[in-house]
């Protein structure tokens, strides 16, 4: 009688590595920025996003390389988008989650401009900034979304939200670990229903609605964050104070890092 060999984590790892090699062969020789971008970890994220289908992952990755060659996200500098960030509507947090992931704080109630193109460019800059600030071996970030002051007047148009979702899902696959929508107003549900249509199932599962008076929500926030670091806007004990001048100084320093890279 033949004994079936027990499936192990080592087997999974070897299969993933084989898929990465297969994808690298499929995309062919790369040079310059494309070569730097397409690390094994990067290829793994694209494979994960396409359920380890090499052909689909290749097509997705090629689209990203084409987008990056024209949009040039790594060349955006803070001084070009700083006016979009004056209110702190999107910023990188000074703390990490319990997994050591970079945290982006989004405050849609602080929307200060109407240009869809500039809003997207500002967010792309901060996505790139979050990536270069990831800890070694870490590939994902967390989002905290504070709805204080959010209203129909400050909400971005559905079309802009759709374009943001497309960029995030198509060109930053598996970068988002989890997104907490903290205490959204009831009318936001209609907006989210329209937006959810554009979310793939994997991304939709990462979106969590949390409420300050809900026991499960409180426990979830404590599971992901140290309450002492978490701003009180999200149920923690810290104070969230956005200083545009100080944040601009930090971004300018990171721009030097990006240029060197």
Image (spheres, helix red, strand yellow):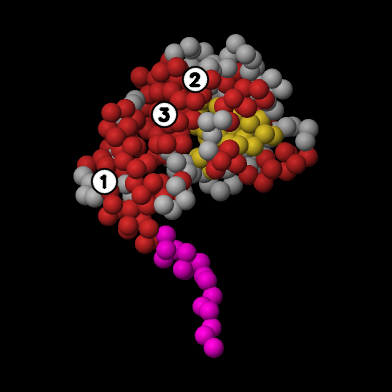
> What is the x, y in percent for residue 177?
54, 43
- Callout 1 touching callout 2 (CB < 8 Å): no
Of the image marks 3 and 2, the number of the one nearer the N terminus: 3
Q: Is residue 253 left or right of residue 216?
A: left
Which residue is found at the position 23% from the left and 46% from the top?
Answer: 30
Determine the CA span between mark 3 and mark 2: 16 Å
Give me the residue at 48% from left, 20% from top: 160
Residue with the mark numbered 2: 159
Tag nearer the camera, 3 or 2: 2
**Front residue of 173 and 238:** 173
Give whichever of discs 1 and 3 has the lower sequence position: 1
Asked if one can make out residue 96 in the rendered structure from this viewpoint, the answer is: no
Q: Mark 1 points at which residue?
A: 35
* Residue 215 on image: x %, y %: 78, 39
Left-right relation of 118 to 260: right
| Magenta-highlighted residues | 1-16
Give residue 81's quadrant in the image. top left
The residue carrying pointer 2 sits among few (fewer than 14), some (14 to 19) or many (20 or more) residues within 10 Å by Cα, namely: few
As drawn, 39 above or below 195:
below
> Which of the 4 image quadrants contains residue 214?
top right
Rounded to the nearest angstrom, the CA distance separating label 1 from label 3 is: 21 Å
In magenta stretch: residue 10: yes
Q: In the displayed image of the protein, which residue is found farthest to the front?
A: 1
Q: Where is residue 180 in the image (x, y as percent from the top left)?
A: 62, 35
Question: N-terminal of the two: label 1 or label 2?
Answer: 1
Report the quarter where the C terminus lies.
Answer: top left
Numbered label attached to residue 124: 3
Q: Residue at x 63, y 44 (%)?
A: 224
């Amino acid at each position: 009688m033949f004994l079936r060999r027990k499936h192990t984590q080592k087997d999974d790892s070897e299969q993933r590595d084989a898929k990465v090699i297969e994808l690298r062969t499929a995309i062919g020789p790369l040079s310059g920025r494309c070569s730097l971008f397409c690390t094994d970890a990067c290829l793994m994220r694209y494979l994960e996003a396409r359920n380890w289908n090499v052909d689909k992952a290749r097509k997705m990755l090629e689209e990203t390389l084409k987008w990056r060659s024209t949009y040039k996200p790594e060349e955006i500098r803070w001084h070009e988008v700083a006016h979009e960030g004056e209110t702190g509507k999107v910023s990188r947090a000074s703390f990490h989650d319990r997994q050591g992931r970079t945290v982006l704080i989004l405050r849609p109630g602080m929307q200060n401009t109407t240009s869809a193109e500039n809003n997207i460019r500002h967010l792309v800059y901060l996505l790139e900034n979050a990536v270069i600030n990831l800890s070694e071996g870490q590939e994902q970030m967390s989002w905290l979304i504070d709805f204080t002051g959010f209203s129909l007047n400050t909400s971005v148009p559905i079309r802009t939200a759709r374009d943001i979702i497309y960029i995030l899902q198509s060109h930053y696959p598996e970068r988002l670990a989890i997104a907490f929508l903290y205490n959204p107003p009831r009318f936001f549900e209609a907006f989210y229903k329209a937006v959810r249509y554009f979310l793939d199932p994997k991304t939709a599962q990462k979106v969590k609605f949390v409420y300050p008076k809900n026991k499960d929500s409180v426990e979830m926030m404590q599971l992901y964050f140290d309450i002492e670091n978490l701003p009180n806007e999200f149920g923690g004990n810290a104070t969230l104070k956005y200083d545009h001048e100080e944040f601009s100084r930090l971004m300018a320093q990171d721009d030097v890092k990006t240029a060197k890279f």
